[in-house]
Image (cartoon, rainbow, N blue to C red):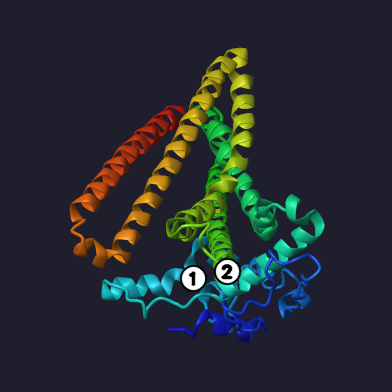
Amino acid sequence: MFPDALEAVGRVEGLPLTSPATPTLPDPDEEEGQREVVPWTSPRRRAGRYRHSLQILKPFRITHKHQHPVDNAGLFSFMTLHWLTPLARRAHKTSSLSTDDVWGLSCHEASEFNCQRLENLWYDELKQKGKDGASLSRVFWRFCQTRMLVAIFSLLITMVTGFVGPALLVRALLEYSQSAEAWLPYGLSLVAGIFLMELMRSWSLALMWAVNYRTAARLRGAALTFAFHKILRLRSTKDISAGELINICSSDGQRVYEAVSVGCLLAGGPLVGILGLSYTAYFLGPTALVGSAIFIFFYPAMMLASRLTAYFRKKCVLVTDQRVRLMNEILGCIKFIKMYCLENAFAQNIHSECLVTLVRTHTHTHTLGLYCFFSGQVTW
């Protein structure tokens, strides 16, 4: 088991190991005249912003100076997830894995290090836009924009190679197999081209997911740590319930993770639509536009289903907050409840809350199934 990630950050990056209870950056609720942003001068920024990230462009790396294998991986090892091979072999030999078998957290995924970077971006946003014009979503985009652009570029390569292989090379190979005059080198070149396109498609898709998962983990850890620091600085929690705090650290953090991990897939849709529409219109003529219009008509229905899903999901979250608040009230006043024999009244309240939760869950599940139905029709 490797050392703690915060110690690795302090050793590799030279950052101070400050406690969350004593943050190095000021509270954004303080007055503008009293706010003084602490400059962040890490060795990583002084030596080059992308010094470590550019090392992954090397096809092969034999270094072992980093504690986590993913930091020692080259391009091919990172794309194919070959750095997980020792863990897979250990799982195959022992048929089980324990926490001692798993590597410690990489120093570049440490929440404290990423939180300091997110805080500096947030204070830069406050300085440029002001307190009223600052946008947290813009700060999130600045936090992960470079890695997201790399993931989008990998996705575009996946889409182009996935289109060129079946649409051009496979079609040329079928025409070659039906032709009377067969030139062997041409056929072999088509087979090699199909193999190369499929290899590039699979590797670029794996690279996109590998980059997205690390980016999502960094942003989720930074956002939750940033929120945790803010909660510790609150003088009173009367304006926010315990259920809302739990949702911030659980469901909201998971939504941030999912948005980053699958968000770049939106960039591939227009490219695939343009390529597919151009290809079908070239071979089938204007009648192909009629078939393509069916897909366009399904998208508003999918948008409506997704809006309904988000609406009922928000309703479920509100009901969950009420149930958690009621349970906290019962646990806090259990002595008085037993003393005054109020068990039946609170039991009825809990039963009614559970019924409301069940109804909301059924409604949310129904709308989610409706969304999956429309999505399946478009995919099919």
Classify residue 219 by image quadrant: bottom right
Q: Nearer the viewer, residue 6 or 195?
A: 6
- The residue labelled by disc 2 is 235
Q: Nearer the viewer, residue 134 or 240?
A: 240
Q: Is residue 88 left or right of residue 201?
A: left
Q: Nearer the viewer, residue 50 or 180?
A: 50
Which residue is depicted at the point 54% across and 28% down? 175
Quarter containing the C terminus? top left
Q: Return the x and y of residue 265 as percentages of the image width and height.
A: 57, 44
Q: Specify whether residue 295 is in view.
A: yes
Classify residue 189 by image quadrant: top right
Q: Return the x and y of residue 18 as percentages of the image width and height.
A: 61, 82
- Disc 1 marks a residue whose amino acid type is Trp
Mark 2 is surrounded, within 10 Å at the Cα level, by few (under 14), some (14 to 19) or many (20 or more) other residues, namely few
Relative to 224, residue 196 above or below: above
Which residue is depicted at the point 54% across and 31% down? 171
Quarter containing the N terminus? bottom left
Which residue is depicted at the point 21% across and 60% down? 340
- Disc 2 marks a residue whose amino acid type is Arg
Q: Earlier in the sequence, mark 1 or mark 2?
A: 1
Residue 194's disc number? none
Local SS, label 2? loop
Local SS, label 1? helix
- The residue labelled by disc 1 is 83
Mark 1 is surrounded, within 10 Å at the Cα level, by few (under 14), some (14 to 19) or many (20 or more) other residues, namely some
Q: Return the x and y of residue 22 as percentages of the image width and height.
A: 61, 80
